[in-house]
Image (cartoon, grey):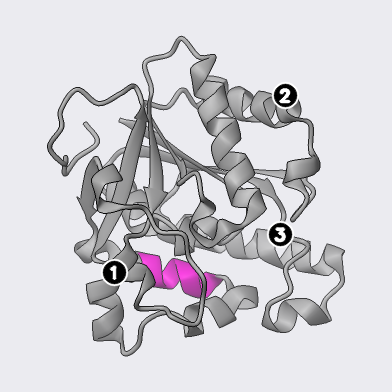
Amino acid sequence: MKLLAIFAHPDDESFGPAGTIARHAYSGHQVGIVTLTRGEAGSLGISSQLSADELARRRIGELHCAARTLGVNYLKIFDLPDKKLSGVANQRGINLIQSQIDSFKPDVLLTFHEQGISGHPDHQTVSRWVVEAMKNSQENIKLLLYGILPEQAAQIPQRKFFPMQPSEVTHRISVKDYLKFKIEAIQCHVTQEELWKAMPQPMEKFIHFAQWEYFKQVWPTPAKKEVQYEFE
């Protein structure tokens, strides 16, 4: 199976479905990550002290570190404007995504839930572009949107989340055995360490929080109504 994850920023893959990415990569599947910005507009922690070019350089390096950690064998980074994706022409974004679908030829596509988990406009824009690309595609590809559940969001009260409702979940993926890779990938993103500090602590609490990753299949409409535990 070939799995392609498409996100807005370096770090989305690690704080997002990194367990699922690692599970498939280390199980022998071909896994790719596409990031549409370089993350140059970040403002957390040390990021606020760096120029846009220096921050972009660092975050690209961090993403390469995370991709290696997760076992990913395909990585593509575009340079659309960070925090300004909603101002990019829709067709341009859709065309970039379609070019990666055509190049990688995935069986499964992953991106964020429509609400972007944190409500970030860039997350929402990329999610919309991926959905639109699939509507125009004749390929037999599954598209799944990653989200967190309300009980997960409640464990990080200092941040505002837009969780996925349990009724939306079509796939529940066990990633407990791959959390070491997720944690190491998160730690690659040094410029984003403030996000890691916000995660449930101590480690036992984080493991309980992150041992399952949840997805909603939106393309094609799933034939089975019961929750699945594999993408295949």
Q: Nearer the viewer, residue 8 or 53?
A: 8
Residue on which disc 2 sits: 91
At x 30%, y 30%, the residue is 1
Dot 3 crowding, Cα within 10 Å, few <14, some 14–19, many 20+: many
* Residue 179 magenta: no
At x 34%, y 46%, the residue is 25
Numbered range of the magenta stretch: 182-188
Residue on which disc 1 sits: 151
Picture layout, residue 209 above or below residue 88: below
Measured as percent of width and height from the top left, residue 116 is found at: 53, 52
Of the 4 image quadrants, the one containing the C terminus is top left
Measured as percent of width and height from the top left, residue 44 is found at: 68, 77
| Secondary structure character of the magenta stretch overall | helix
Amino acid type at image mark 1:
Glu
Which of the 4 quarters of the picture holds residue 91? Answer: top right
Which circle, 2 or 1, is nearer the viewer? 1
